[in-house]
Image (spheres, coloured by chain):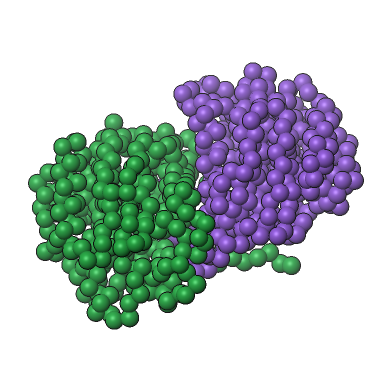
Chain colours: A purple, B green
Amino acid sequence: MRIVTLAAAQLGPIQRAESRQHVVARMLELMDQAKAKGATMILYPELALTTFFPRWYMEDQAEVDAWFEREMPNAATLPLFERAKEYGMAMSFGYAELTPEGRHFNTCILVDRTGKIVGKYRKTHLPGHSEFDTSRAFQHLEKRYFEPGDTGFPVWRTEGGLFGMCICNDRRWPETYRVMGLQGVEMVLLGYNTPSVNSQKADEGPEKRLFHNRLSVQAGAYQNSTWVAAVAKAGNEDGFPLIGGSLIVDPNGEIVAEATTEDDELLVHACDLDATKFGKATIFDFARHRRIEHYGRITAQTGVELPPE
Amino acid sequence: MRIVTLAAAQLGPIQRAESRQHVVARMLELMDQAKAKGATMILYPELALTTFFPRWYMEDQAEVDAWFEREMPNAATLPLFERAKEYGMAMSFGYAELTPEGRHFNTCILVDRTGKIVGKYRKTHLPGHSEFDTSRAFQHLEKRYFEPGDTGFPVWRTEGGLFGMCICNDRRWPETYRVMGLQGVEMVLLGYNTPSVNSQKADEGPEKRLFHNRLSVQAGAYQNSTWVAAVAKAGNEDGFPLIGGSLIVDPNGEIVAEATTEDDELLVHACDLDATKFGKATIFDFARHRRIEHYGRITAQTGVELPPE
């Protein structure tokens, strides 16, 4: 057994006016609870430090950049790093990253129990659109404020196992999990901000959104025989509802813990990384069963190519 | 609306001693029921004409070859072709194919409403093993009796839509659906024979096997915004139980029909191929959202490559 006692720390809503300092205080409260429950790793959601700002249309780049972090840790987030190190707890959270070169990414990091940043991932699959879209019930401007990530999907050796990360919409794409599965990943950490209603389809509400969240995460776990933990920022942010439904899924694809609120809420589960071994050695023994000679389209073409008429 | 009224024709068990003629009579009975319910297409399972013979270890090649079809249609299956044509019903079923060159495949075909074979698919992902395995509770010798398919995953224009096929274990591999999704597939037809217990893990019984079946099929449908119909050969074959759980899944990943028995059983659903359009134009608009520059491992490596120590 190789146990990682994982705390999936769902955050309730963060209003637009709420400061990073206030959010970090909420995150520290969850970290304290996680420590009391024996957690050795804590996972917070995508863009954990602020409201989900891509719903707001902005034209002033200075206004946009105010939502981004120029260094990590910084003054606002240093208390997280210090307390996690004090507790000997590994940590992952998402934030908007502005690089010294002026590039904007939707980013998350993996911090080991000594407080060292050992992994950084930048979101690959940006949903939404880049210009104001009057046909939508509300805006989802990730393609405006971020560029697609340049990291690919690395897997890191840390904390006694093989860890990968992805962010929100990445979880709907089987390529995400498979690229990590091909590096032997044993636990995928991911956070999300998912509106409770499809902005382009009013009758697709929270039940269906939660169903798609579970389905994507469970399939990714099963088909790569890996743990996956997915943690939400949830609830009503300035009138815009986000689903909760944070969950921890085992390498069989079964849900072992699931959030019941849309508030700050902690799920803790003792995840045995050795539970990934059976699936990886049998039905998903890639070396014996995959047939890459028939997968060519997956990397050769981006969009659909219809068969000839 | 482009409606295909699909009949998913689950077959109950076929004992080793049962003749093809007897099985075809059962298939015709299901076809008659399908016609009465307005079906325009009927789908039968993998290796529909015989018992699931890969559970039996055989060393005499003549004994093996007796389970294979040398031409299609042949005397035993001609009544299926004739009646489907009479009914103006498209049809798909699986069988063991022995080619004139002596090659062995686990195959299925798609026959249009005029009785013409318009598509042939040969199973890509063969599960199991090739030599007698004393460590298993029972044998699963697909890797002994078949070679991996050489067709890839084509998509055919027929019956007013875009159709693909896969077989049994193929459904657990997201590459299967994605290669078809990249050709715009609107309906995937598949059959399976799935033992109710994992031969290498006695505590993985029918509930978990049914869960994995649903999970794989639902995720493939949702992530490619396509209909998927999966139909079982089910029940107790000479003491070896197979799961049922045949199902039809819509392009949102939702189950719209599911079998309740392990016998011959018909599911009929009016599937609107235009229901695939919304997903393909929005969240799964591949041309806008896929990032193939980060998927390279999927086609560059077959097995796992661990990160450096």
Q: Where residue A154 appears, x then y in whole percent?
A: 67, 56
Looking at the image, residue B305 sits to the left or right of residue A95; the answer is left
Q: Nearer the viewer, residue A184 or B277?
A: A184
In this picture, is A206 found above or below B67?
A: above
* Residue at the spot 30% in from the left edge and 72% down from the top edge: B104
Horizontal relation, residue B147 to residue A238: left or right: left
- Please name the residue shown 66% across and 52% down the image: A187
Residue furthest out toward the bottom? B60
Q: Quadrant of the C terminus of chain B?
A: bottom right
Q: Residue at x 73, y 30 (%)?
A: A264
Residue A41 percent location from the top left of the image: 77, 47
Q: Is residue A41 left or right of residue A196?
A: right
Q: Which residue lies at the image location 44% right of the left edge and 71% below the top edge?
A: B129
Q: Quadrant of the N terminus of chain B?
A: top left
Residue A125 in the image, given as x and y percentages of width and height: 58, 43
Q: Is residue B85 above or below residue A1?
A: above
Examine the rendering and report whether any part of residue B166 can be seen. no
Measuring from the top left, give residue A188's x and y in whole percent: 65, 50
Corner quadrant of residue A146: top right
Q: Of A248 and B73, which appears nearest the observer?
A: A248
> In this figure, what is the number of numbered marks?
0
Please state if A117 lies on the left or on the right of B229 as rendered. Answer: right
Res B309 visible: yes
Nearest the camera: A166 or A259? A259
The answer to whether residue B4 is above or below residue B55 is above
Residue that sits furthest to the top in the current view: A239
